[in-house]
Image (cartoon, grey):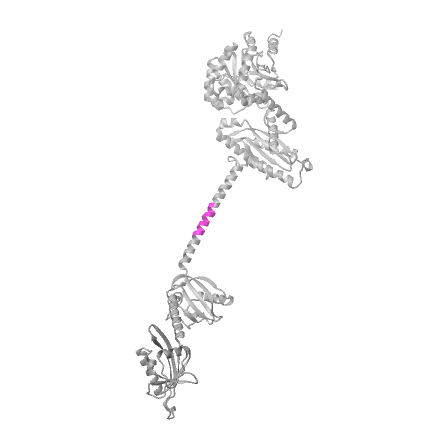
């Protein structure tokens, strides 16, 4: 509305007064005490007068009475007044007016009129804003009081500007009042908490960023964990203090500690389980690379060792495709193998065999240079790798090992002598393969075995040709009899006393190979056993020998024919029947036949052997234990077996002159069992004389008669029996 200009006779309505109040300051004065007129000063040029009653009409009854009393008191006594009242001039609309003024005291009137000078201002906006601020402050304080978090605002000197009552929960000495405004915080908290407060205050004020810390302490006799966060308190663009939030995190810390303990337990279990798994893996790796019986490395470890050695030859440049430096082989391989290990198992059981292998492994370890790789290849085969040794040194070490290993072992409380063979080969080039070295050592070792068992043999190139020959023989052996390549030779059995009668002959099979010539039985009988054809060969030998010797038996030149039979014949129950059929076929009487078997047969299964041999004896067939003493015969079992003859192994015969005790024991034992004793392999007159002195009744050997075919045998017998 247009701004009104007052004159001395203008009276305003309440609406007009309030409109003026909204637009400008209004001055007023009371011209005369007790008069209901208030003179209003609108501007410098205009004055107006207004009835105070109109103004009071905007006030409530109580506020109007209070304002009127205040004005009258100031007019009567002099002084200042300063009040605010709400004015209501329309339904639902209210304005706040600020009344302030001054009236000189009566003594200063100097006889003039009493004047009340004052100012009316519309302060609705300010009052509303202030009321809103108070309301927000109340809400904020209420919110702070309801929070479980200790909240404080402090100035730069550490005095409280604001706090809530939750803060008392963390104080060392609770305050008398919840309101700590203006108080110093240094005396409220325990020293360790105060140290954290000061550190965080300094950090927040120095960096301008939030600082956080936690602490464990005792408060009111109980453990408590607090988390405190500090931030700079900004006002008017300046940092004037700090704002802090303190939280009780005791339960959380307890849970964290429990979680840490649980995690530690889990980690311990994980570590324990990991250690267990590692141990299992180590055990599996060890098992994969080691022999469980002896604890020695196995073939897999041997292959790894060899691969590492060969990689080293190429890496350091010390070896190429040519011969190794200084004339030394790059590597030497020794293969150690027991002779007739099966007989150990037969005599002492597999437990005894295992014990022997363990003792053998221990001796090998002690006899080798430190660090020399040793492994158990398989069964009773052991392999040694040597580096940086000459062939002479390798052979010397092998012979030293042989001497150590030939010392008796102890099994079942008894001293047991075993035979061994060692094959030696050398790697001269970096391109060699382990399988080739193993083959070469194996060839050397079995060459030694075939030449008489035991000893040290070094691989030579001809042995490979020999191996190739044996492989050819294995291929050609089946059908050799049908092709007419097999023949039978006869070696007489001679009485060692008296006129030297010849009671019988032994049939010996020979193989005349079309390419390789004469092959001895030691070369091909083992092949035939491996192929399963030995039974056919044995029966062929019986038929052929019976056909050729039967005329000599009928003529009274000899009484018996001895034929060797493999233990494979005794695996079933059909052998006696096959023997009867063959004798009927050839016409040879059962009493003229002596079946020779090795002692291993009745050591392996003496019950079965007992049954089968008694069946043969009932038919009138003689039974001889061939090569007696070579193995580990049990005298307790021997005396219960149905035998008619013992043939002493040539190894004992060869030493009968120097060590007669063994042969004497055999002869005496055989005599007590009413058995005929035949000494095999008599080669010298001294051996013959020693056997005669020991009371041995019969013998065979080159010194007495070599093997011969049937015509030569007939002539030899004729010359011996008819010397004239």
Residue 104: x %, y % from top left: 38, 88
Image quarter in which the N terminus is found: bottom left
Say if residue 522 shows up in the picture: no
Residue 669: x %, y % from top left: 50, 20
Counting every numbered tag in the picture gives: 0
In this image, 346 relative to 81: left or right?
right
Overall secondary structure of the magenta section: helix
In the depicted view, which residue is nearer to us: 123 or 719?
Answer: 123
- The image quadrant of residue 400 is top right
In the depicted view, which residue is nearer to us: 482 or 412?
Answer: 482
Identify the residue shown where x is 50% and y is 10%: 584
In the depicted view, which residue is nearer to us: 249 or 449?
Answer: 249
Residue 74: x %, y % from top left: 35, 85
Identify the residue shown where x is 51% and y is 34%: 293
The furthest residue to the left? 61
In the depicted view, which residue is nearer to us: 207 or 629?
Answer: 207
The correct choice, above or below, for 145 with respect to 594 in the image is: below
The furthest residue to the front? 2
Identify the residue shown where x is 46% and y is 62%: 213
Image quarter in which the C terminus is found: top right
Q: Is residue 267 magenta?
A: yes
Residue 45: x %, y % from top left: 43, 85
- The image quadrant of residue 399 is top right
In this image, 114 relative to 201: left or right?
left
The correct choice, above or below, for 512 with respect to 322 in the image is: above
The correct choice, above or below, for 615 with respect to 95 in the image is: above
Q: Is residue 148 magenta?
A: no
Say if residue 530 shows up in the picture: yes
Residue range in magenta is: 262-273
């Amino acid at each position: 509305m247009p701004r009104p200009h007052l004159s001395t006779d203008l009276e305003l309505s309440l609406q007009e007064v309030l409109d003026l109040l909204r637009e400008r300051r209004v001055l007023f004065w009371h011209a005369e005490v007790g008069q209901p007129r208030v003179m209003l000063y609108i501007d410098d040029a205009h004055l107006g007068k207004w009835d105070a009653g109109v103004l009071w009409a905007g006030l409530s009854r109580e506020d109007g009475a209070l304002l009127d009393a205040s004005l009258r008191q100031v007019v009567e006594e002099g002084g200042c007044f300063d009040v605010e009242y709400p004015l209501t001039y329309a339904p639902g609309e209210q304005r706040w007016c600020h009344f302030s003024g001054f009236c000189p005291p009566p003594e200063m009137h100097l006889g003039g009129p009493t004047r009340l000078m004052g100012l009316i201002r519309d302060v609705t906006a300010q009052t509303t804003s202030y009321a809103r601020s108070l309301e927000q402050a109340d809400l904020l304080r209420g919110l702070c009081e309801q929070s479980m978090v200790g909240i404080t605002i402090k100035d730069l000197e550490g005095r409280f500007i604001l706090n809530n009552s939750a803060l008392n929960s963390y104080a060392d000495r609770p305050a008398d009042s919840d309101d700590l405004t203006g108080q110093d915080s240094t005396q409220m908290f325990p020293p360790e908490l105060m140290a954290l407060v000061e550190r965080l205050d300094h950090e927040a004020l120095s960096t301008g960023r939030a600082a956080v810390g936690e602490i464990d302490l005792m408060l009111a006799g109980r453990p408590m964990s607090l988390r405190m966060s500090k931030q700079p308190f900004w006002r008017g663009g300046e940092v004037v203090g700090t704002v802090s939030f303190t939280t009780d995190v005791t339960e959380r810390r307890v849970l964290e500690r429990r979680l840490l303990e649980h995690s530690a337990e889990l980690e311990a279990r994980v570590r324990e389980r990991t250690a267990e798994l590692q141990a299992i893996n180590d055990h599996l790796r060890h098992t994969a690379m080691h022999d469980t019986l002896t604890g020695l490395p196995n073939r897999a470890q041997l292959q790894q060792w060899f691969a590492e050695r060969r990689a080293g030859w190429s890496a350091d440049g010390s070896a190429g495709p040519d011969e190794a430096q200084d004339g030394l082989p790059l590597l030497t391989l020794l293969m150690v193998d027991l002779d007739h290990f099966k007989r150990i198992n037969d005599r002492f059981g597999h437990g005894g065999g295992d014990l022997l292998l363990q003792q053998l492994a221990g001796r090998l370890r002690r006899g080798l240079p430190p660090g020399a790789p040793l492994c158990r290849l398989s069964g009773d085969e052991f392999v040694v790798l040597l580096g940086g040794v000459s062939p002479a040194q390798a052979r010397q070490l092998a012979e030293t090992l042989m001497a150590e290993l030939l010392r008796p072992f102890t099994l079942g409380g008894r001293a047991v002598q075993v035979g061994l063979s060692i094959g030696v080969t050398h790697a001269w080039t970096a391109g060699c393969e382990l399988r080739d070295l193993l083959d070469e050592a194996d060839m050397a070792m079995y060459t030694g075995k075939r030449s008489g068992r035991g000893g040290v043999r070094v691989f030579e190139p001809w042995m490979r040709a020999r191996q190739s020959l044996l492989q050819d023989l294995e291929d050609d052996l089946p059908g050799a009899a049908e092709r007419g390549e097999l023949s039978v030779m006869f070696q007489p059995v001679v009485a060692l006393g008296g006129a030297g009668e010849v009671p019988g002959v032994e049939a010996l099979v020979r193989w005349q190979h079309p390419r390789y010539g004469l092959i001895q039985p030691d070369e091909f009988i083992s092949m035939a056993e491996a192929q399963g054809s030995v039974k056919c060969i044995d029966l062929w030998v019986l038929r052929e020998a019976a056909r050729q010797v039967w005329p000599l038996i009928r003529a009274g030149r000899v009484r018996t024919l001895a034929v060797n039979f493999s233990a494979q014949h005794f695996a079933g129950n059909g052998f006696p029947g096959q023997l009867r059929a063959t004798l009927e076929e050839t016409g040879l009487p059962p009493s003229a036949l002596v079946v020779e078997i090795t002692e291993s047969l009745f050591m392996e299964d003496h019950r079965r052997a007992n049954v089968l041999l008694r069946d043969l004896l009932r038919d009138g067939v003689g039974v001889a234990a061939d090569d007696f003493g070579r193995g580990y015969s049990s005298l307790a079992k021997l005396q219960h077996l149905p035998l008619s003859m013992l043939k002493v192994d040539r190894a004992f015969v060869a030493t009968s002159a120097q060590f007669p005790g063994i042969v004497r024991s055999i002869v005496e034992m055989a005599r007590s069992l009413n058995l005929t004793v035949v000494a095999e392999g008599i080669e010298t007159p001294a051996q013959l004389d020693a056997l005669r002195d020991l009371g041995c009744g019969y013998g065979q050997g080159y010194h007495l008669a070599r093997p011969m075919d049937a015509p030569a045998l007939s002539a030899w017998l004729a010359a011996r029996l008819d010397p004239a």
